[in-house]
């Protein structure tokens, strides 16, 4: 075989081996120059180009491609796990084609300053990582499709200006390249060192819509350059300790770059919806002046129909141009305050505050001299509808954790969060900001711990008038739960017929019975449902067969909820009873009960559990009067005394002491019935009245402060029902009834009772 034919055969066999195994040529390639014009997938695991040129116009597949101080040129398709590009000073061509990086696309710039390298490729990757190490590093985007399949954008500056640029702007007579880009992927900004920063820039009349901007740490910004440039930033998050700016750069005169145009004639717009500023973090709008006092920054329009600011502890959100101003006379004072170039065009502003200790000013002067914390808004009647409306559309809401129990003080702290700024000149002629109170703004302290909240309005002098008290739903929910023991105990109330059915029809000397009760109760916002399962045994007294003596055991489980929580309950009850049926139709029924009540509670404070003992004794009397044709009427009277013991439990860091409760319930009722061949049917109506029913609860927070509430669950209510007793045989009897209550604090929406009794 000729040598050439042998080589071809070997190459073909090797290629077939790769197709079969996927790894025949899975080698590493380290080279100066690399060029691919065809389809090359799987031949190399890694490709590293150092100090040379990478040129792909075909289809290339590998695990990793690294450009180390080289030139990257691509118009084809690249499929890798990791693409890592660091070019030399001449590496400025657009990054084009299609790029798929299954793990990460890393761009580290070039060996010279190149902040706006065009990225026109369609990029598919979970993470686009732009890293600036020494020189300015950035990628320039011109359409939304480029980053539509990127899940996360991470911009990291380790000293130089590093970022993402939307569109292009030229400082000579060449036209700008305008771009309108939407980025759904979250954009993370991180600055680790140096005077420059991680940023996003929008230039030359371009526009950006970004769903999420997250400033991780260090100095970061979004900058708008030139005239008619805009950015819609739906969510901005400045993490704890971060420093984030909305910055502008004005349009300069191309004929005299050192003489900028009037900044008020160059307009950029930030459309904002939601801003979160973490603890010890700063958000600001930056309008800087040059060292010679001139202004090269455009006026900044801040626009929103409804802007929400979530403010952490020791945090600042500056729309007043205060920047790093530290107060007149301070050695670190910045004199570049230009609040007049910030137009706060916001229709409605809501500020959610988490932490208010820093606003505990003792005097109004302290408030007006502090430029470190809060939300600053410049008073510009031309552009500030909030001011035009008397700040009526500003609402400051304090988190529940801010609640100290002193409502007046809590609301005052919230009033000091907003600081309206205007300009004045000191004796040296320096323009400085002055703090004014947001007259007419609304402040609202959420309930927290065991304390109520409230609402107020800010006066001209910064003080607050309390307009409304907001009850703490957790407190009053716990108060409602305090009634659960009595509610549960009332569910145990029944009469002889409910428990035993038509005892008159039971002819045997002994009786065994089972029954089930299911019902639903309401008390204020509390709703509960329960099931009771009961088993009993009794026998007639040998010395007087009119008497039936017995015992029963029951188990109840239930659950329910209220405005701020939920609960589960279970009861175990032991009952002793004696019932006497006289020949003249009269009867007496005596019942004694002991129960162990268990309740598991869940609310926003935390989980709690308590047990309590319950006792009761009751007497019922009545007499049946037959009316002919099988009809009868049976008036009844009943008196029951009950006691539920006290209980202590903890929910979160709140201690709850539930008082014991007494109950003395009287019932006057009547049954109307008709006897049938094998039983009867009846209607029932009763009026019940609890002559006691008082209880109370004491709450103690982590600081030892107490709050107590009394409850009176006494009073009257009505009960109506319908039922039947069916004699399946001489020995077996089935009974069923359903009832509902009206009036009273506690209502039974429905309750049914079904049982079966066997006598022998």
Image (cartoon, rainbow, N blue to C red):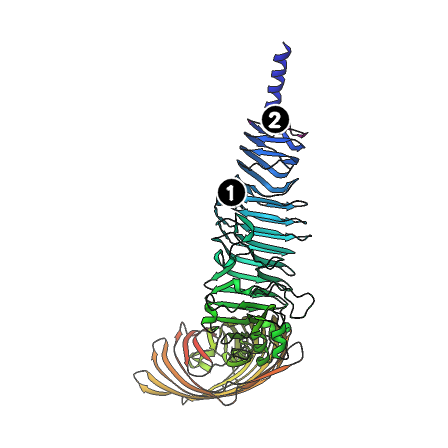
Furthest residue in direction left, as rendered? 629
Give the quarter of the figure containing the N terminus: top right
Q: Secondary structure at mark 2?
A: helix
Classify 481 as above or below 695.
Answer: above
Q: Position of residue 124 (x, y in %)?
A: 54, 41
As displayed, is residue 61 above or below residue 429? above
Q: Which residue is mark 1?
A: 146
Q: Position of residue 630 (x, y in %)?
A: 32, 82
Please rate how many residues cluster around mark 2, counting C-alpha atoms within 10 Å: few if below 14, some from 14 to 19, many from 20. Answer: some
Q: Is residue 29 magenta?
A: yes
* Viewer-side residue, 666 vs 400: 400
Segment colored magenta: 18-38
Label 1: few (<14), some or many (≥20) within 10 Å? many
Left or right, 195 with respect to 671, comes to right
Q: Which residue is mark 2?
A: 18
Where residue 606 appears, x then y in whole percent?
60, 70
Residue 760 seen by the camera: no
Considering depth in this image, is 62 or 632 the residue closer to the camera?
Answer: 62
Q: Nearer the viewer, residue 299 or 743?
A: 299
């Amino acid at each position: 075989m000729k040598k050439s034919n042998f080589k071809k055969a070997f190459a073909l066999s090797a290629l077939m081996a790769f197709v079969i195994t996927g790894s025949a040529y899975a080698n590493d390639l380290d080279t100066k120059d690399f060029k691919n014009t065809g389809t090359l997938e799987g031949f190399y695991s890694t490709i590293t180009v150092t100090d040379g040129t990478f040129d792909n116009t075909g289809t290339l597949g590998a695990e990793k491609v690294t450009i180390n101080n080289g030139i990257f040129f691509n118009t084809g398709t690249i499929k890798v796990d990791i693409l890592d590009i660091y070019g030399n000073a001449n590496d400025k061509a657009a990054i084009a084609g299609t790029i798929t990086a299954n793990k990460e696309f890393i761009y580290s710039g070039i060996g010279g300053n190149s902040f706006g390298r065009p990225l026109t490729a369609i990029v598919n990757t979970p993470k686009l990582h732009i890293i600036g190490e020494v020189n300015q590093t950035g990628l320039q985007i011109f359409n939304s499709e480029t980053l539509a399949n990127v899940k996360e954008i991470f911009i990291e500056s380790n000293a130089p200006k590093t970022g993402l640029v939307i569109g292009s702007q030229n400082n000579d007579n060449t036209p700008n390249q305008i771009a309108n880009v939407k980025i759904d992927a979250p954009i993370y900004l991180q600055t680790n060192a140096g005077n420059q920063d991680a940023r996003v820039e929008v230039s030359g009349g371009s526009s950006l819509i970004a769903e999420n901007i997250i400033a991780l740490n260090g100095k970061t910004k979004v900058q708008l350059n030139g005239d008619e440039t805009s950015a819609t930033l739906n969510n901005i998050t400045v993490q704890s300790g971060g420093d984030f700016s909305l910055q502008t750069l004005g349009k300069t005169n191309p004929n005299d770059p050192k003489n900028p145009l009037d900044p008020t004639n160059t307009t950029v717009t930030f459309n904002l919806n939601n801003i979160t500023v973490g603890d010890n973090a700063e958000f600001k709008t930056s309008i800087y002046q040059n060292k010679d006092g001139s202004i090269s920054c455009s006026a900044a329009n801040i626009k929103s129909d409804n802007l929400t600011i979530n403010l952490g502890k020791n945090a600042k959100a500056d729309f007043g141009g205060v920047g790093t101003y530290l107060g007149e006379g301070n050695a670190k004072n910045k004199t570049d305050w230009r609040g007049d170039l910030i137009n706060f065009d916001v229709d409605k502003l809501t500020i959610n505050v988490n932490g208010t200790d820093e606003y505990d000013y003792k005097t109004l002067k302290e408030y007006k001299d502090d430029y470190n914390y809060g939300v600053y808004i410049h008073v510009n009647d031309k552009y500030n509808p909030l001011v035009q409306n008397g700040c009526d559309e500003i609402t400051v809401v304090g988190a529940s954790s801010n609640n100290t129990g002193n409502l007046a003080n809590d609301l005052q702290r919230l009033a000091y969060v907003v600081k309206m700024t205007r300009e004045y000149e000191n004796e040296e002629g320096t323009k400085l900001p002055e703090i004014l109170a947001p007259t007419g703004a609304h402040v609202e302290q959420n309930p927290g711990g065991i304390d109520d909240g409230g609402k107020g309005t800010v006066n001209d002098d910064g003080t607050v008038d309390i307009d409304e008290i907001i009850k703490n739903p957790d407190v009053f929910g716990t108060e409602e739960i305090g009634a659960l023991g009595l509610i549960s105990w009332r569910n145990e109330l029944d009469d002889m017929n409910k428990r035993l059915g038509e005892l008159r029809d039971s002819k045997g000397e002994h009786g065994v019975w089972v029954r089930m009760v299911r019902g639903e109760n309401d008390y204020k916002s509390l709703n509960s449902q329960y099931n009771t399962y009961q088993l009993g045994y009794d026998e007639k007294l040998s010395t007087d067969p009119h008497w039936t003596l017995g015992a029963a055991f029951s188990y109840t489980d239930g659950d329910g909820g209220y405005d701020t929580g939920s609960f589960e309950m279970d009861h175990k009850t032991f009952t002793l009873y004696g019932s006497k049926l006289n020949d003249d139709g009269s009867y007496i029924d005596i019942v004694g009960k002991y129960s162990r009540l268990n309740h598991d509670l869940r609310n926003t404070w935390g989980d709690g559990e308590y047990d309590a003992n319950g006792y009761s004794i009751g007497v019922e009397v009545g007499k049946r009067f037959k009316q002919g044709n099988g009809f009868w009427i049976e008036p009844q009277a009943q008196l029951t005394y009950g006691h539920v013991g006290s209980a202590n439990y903890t929910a979160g860091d709140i201690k709850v002491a539930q008082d014991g409760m007494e109950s003395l319930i009287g019932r006057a009722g009547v049954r109307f019935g008709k006897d049938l061949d094998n039983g009867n049917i009846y209607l029932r109506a009763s009026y019940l009245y609890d002559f006691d029913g008082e209880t109370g609860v004491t709450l103690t927070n982590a600081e030892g402060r107490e709050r107590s509430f009394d409850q009176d669950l006494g009073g009257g209510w009505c009960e109506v029902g319908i039922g039947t007793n069916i004699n399946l045989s001489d020995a077996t009897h089935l009974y069923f009834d359903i009832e509902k209550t009206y009036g009273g604090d506690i209502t039974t929406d429905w309750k049914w009772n079904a049982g079966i009794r066997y006598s022998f």
